Image (cartoon, helix red, strand yellow):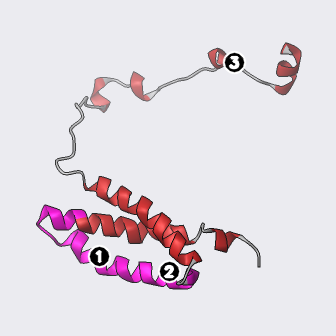
Amino acid sequence: MNIARAELGAVRLEELRFDNRYGRLPPDFYTRLSPTPLPEPYLVAFNVGAIIGTASWGRLSEAALGRRGAVTLAALLGVCAIPMYLGVDEPVTLWIGAFLMGACGCGIWGTRFSSSSTTKR
């Protein structure tokens, strides 16, 4: 078995050389900072919206709307959600806007990978 591994060029993990050149730089090139949490993590709402939007728009593209209808509706709703995401001062409105931007902006990709778009007719 070792002969077969040698013939294929397989290497064990211990034999690999890892080199972190950034870690060897002198302190003039970097400053160590402690991580700071986000004061209000709106990206959580954006990512949850993207997950739910991908599943929802994918399902809608397979059902009544069709692929073009789902893409059109998601794009229009995404454009309508831009003011809620960019031009607000209230945290609740920003959370809702981040969710809608994720659901419509990233969720639109659910129409591309639905089963109706990948099967031949």
The stretch of residues the image draws in magenta is 66-95
Going by the image, does 117 lie left or right of 68? right
Q: In which quarter of the image is the C terminus?
A: bottom right
Rounded to the nearest angstrom, the CA distance separating label 1 from label 2 is: 16 Å
**In whole angstroms, how far apart are the C-alphas of marks 3 and 2?**
49 Å
* Image: 77 above or below 110: below
| Residue position for label 1 | 81
Crowdedness near tag 1: few (<14), some (14–19) or many (≥20) residues, C-alpha within 10 Å: many
What is the x, y in percent for residue 50?
41, 62
Which residue is drawn at the image coordinates 69% and 69% (left, top)? 118
Looking at marks 3 and 1 on the same chain, the residue that comes earlier in the sequence is marked by 3
Q: Relative to 9, is 78 on the left or the right?
A: left
Nearest the viewer among 111 and 33 is 111
90 and 53: which one is in front? 53
- SS assignment at label 2: helix
- Identify the residue position indicated by label 2 in the image: 70
Residue drawn at x 65%, y 68% is 115
Quick one: label 3, few (<14), some, or many (20+) residues within 10 Å? few
Q: Is residue 86 magenta?
A: yes
Tell me which secondary structure the magenta stretch mostly adopts. Answer: helix
Which kind of residue does numbered mark 2 sit on?
Ala
Q: Find out whether residue 11 is within the magenta segment.
A: no
Q: Name the residue under label 3.
A: 12
Q: What residue type is labelled 3?
A: Arg
Q: Three-letter amino acid code at disc 1?
A: Ala
